Amino acid sequence: MIVIGDISGIQNYVFDIAETGGGQARRLRARSFFVQLLAETAALRVRRALGWLPETVLLCGAGKFTLRGPGTGLRDGILTKEQQAINNWLLRTTRGELRLTLAWADAAESDEAAYRAAQSELQQRKARPWAPPAGASWADSRLILDPLDTPCSLCHHAPASTEEVDPDGIRRLVCDACNKTRELGRLLPRARWLVIRDVPTGADLEMLGLGIDVVTSDSVTVTPGTLAVANLREPEKCPSWCHRDRFMQRRLMAHVPVNDEGQPVWFTELADAHSQGAALLAVLKADADSLGVCFDRLLNSNGLDAMRALSDRLDAFFAGRLRRELSIPSERWHSIYTVFAGGDDLVMIGPWDIMVDFAGTVRQWFAEEFSDLGLTLSASLELIKPKRPIKPAVERAESLLNETKKAGKDRLAALGQIWPWKNHEQIIDQAKKLAGWVESGAIERGWLHTLLALAMTRHGDEPDPLATAHLAYHVDRNWKQGTPSRHWANQLVNDFDDREQFHVRYLPAIVRYALTATRKRDEED
């Protein structure tokens, strides 16, 4: 028998964070962790209700889980009851922002057939959110939320119940969920262990009727009521004081930049201290291309275990290797904040220029890890001011990622253009060269605006051939003869009518990078 669980509404929930009140990074960290933990606890509840052992968990991560165990028709009532209980909790706690869909199947011929049947059923059920079980009538009252009265000043989704003081000394009334989210985000950078207990009494967090403790001490007291323990710093290492049956080998923690005192660095600090030119951050969103096709091929040829092996490899890369690389203090990547990395995708935030370089490096690492399967990676970068809400930037990055995949996959969308990864290094090298000429005084920064305007005029929606003559006049009049910059500009003039020339095709992105890298902190372009 195969049971599949899928949590919907994750992106809206995780990124629906107010920039007011400070601690946007902290709340992002906590909400991302909350969703990962939600999938784990839901899988644990379902497994316990069915009487299945820990080894029945095939996959768990990125808001999804797959279980495989002994099947019988008597399980239907148990699973229906569990789904209702979990969704009732989600209605109360997230006010319907998150919901769980369960689907299951028991095919006599093979586990693979059962998996396909369960996936088909899952898609049908996801199309009917909050629907009652088959044959039951709608319980409309369950979907009517209590009045807000005084809404939370941060999320505006729940009644305010707690007073909170932000870093500027401003007092705000917030809901219980936002208050706990902030405290969870504060604890996570120092956390060593995650403990799930069978009762919520006295726990740091209550989830689906279970107690969750985020522990910062060296060890944990394991009692008969302890259901699971996860090592947040070394996920594969089971401590001597924890029985193997209760050890949950999951990569739940993400990298968080910290200062010399070990305190998490705020978004504004990241932008001010680590970005070149403009004090901006960039959101990087990336995922594997055509993964469903690859999974289906493995399922057909080698069954569920082969699919599970690939899922483990992907998670080891996104949640394992990337975290290790970011954790090296001497590397530039140490200043990158991981919102989410696991399953087959990632969302990261960091100083804009570092993120541009990191995107190419991630793609290189991905190619090294998965060249045997021919998997490719698509990504997008969206620049953002550090005090702006993160949600719109992530939505724009998502839209850009979709455009990238439509353009042919295995590409990056950034700085207003889309290009194949094979061109990434050359584009950024030319951009850095332009920025260097500005910084050295070889060319004036205003000339970059001229290049950008002429590029858009010559090769925009309504191409104007006269733009080439204007470029030739501009270069002849301003760019100093006999210099590397003039040689570059002369070549650009010669090729300007041919959009297929590399430096002409990607000139807008090259110039936008240089403009951003040379912008003074008090200037606006």
Image (cartoon, grey):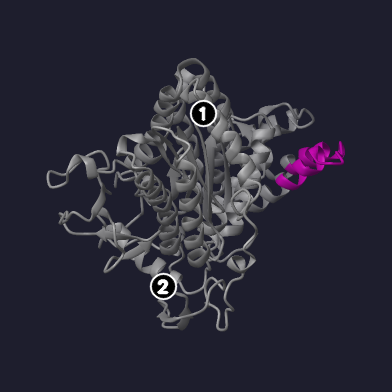
Residue topped by disc 2? 179
| Apparent side of residue 414 relative to residue 473 in the rendered image (left or right) | left
Q: Is residue 191 magenta?
A: no
Say whether residue 364 is visible.
yes
| Apparent side of residue 203 relative to residue 389 in the rendered image (left or right) | left
Q: Which residues are magenta?
A: 452-474
Is 446 located above or below residue 268 in the figure? above
Foreground pick, 77 / 146: 77
Quadrant where the C terminus is found in the figure: bottom right
- The crowd level at tag 2 (other Cα within 10 Å; few <14, some 14-19, many 20+) is some
Q: Secondary structure at mark 1?
A: helix
Is 469 located above or below residue 334 in the figure? above
Observer-side mark, 2 or 1, equals: 1
Q: Is residue 460 magenta?
A: yes
- Secondary structure mostly seen in magenta is helix
Say whether residue 350 is visible.
no
Foreground pick, 300 / 406: 300
Rendered location of residue 76, percent (x, y): 49, 43
Asked whether disc 2 touches disc 1, contact meaning CB atoms under 8 Å apart, the reply is no
Rendered location of residue 309, percent (x, y): 39, 26
Of callouts 2 and 1, which one flags the residue occurring earlier in the amino acid sequence? Answer: 1
The residues bearing labels 2 and 1 have C-alpha atoms spaced at a distance of: 43 Å
Residue topped by disc 1? 114
Q: Which kind of residue does numbered mark 1 sit on?
A: Ala
Residue, x 35% and y 35% (percent of image)? 56
Foreground pick, 252 / 198: 198
Residue, x 57% and y 53% (percent of image)? 394
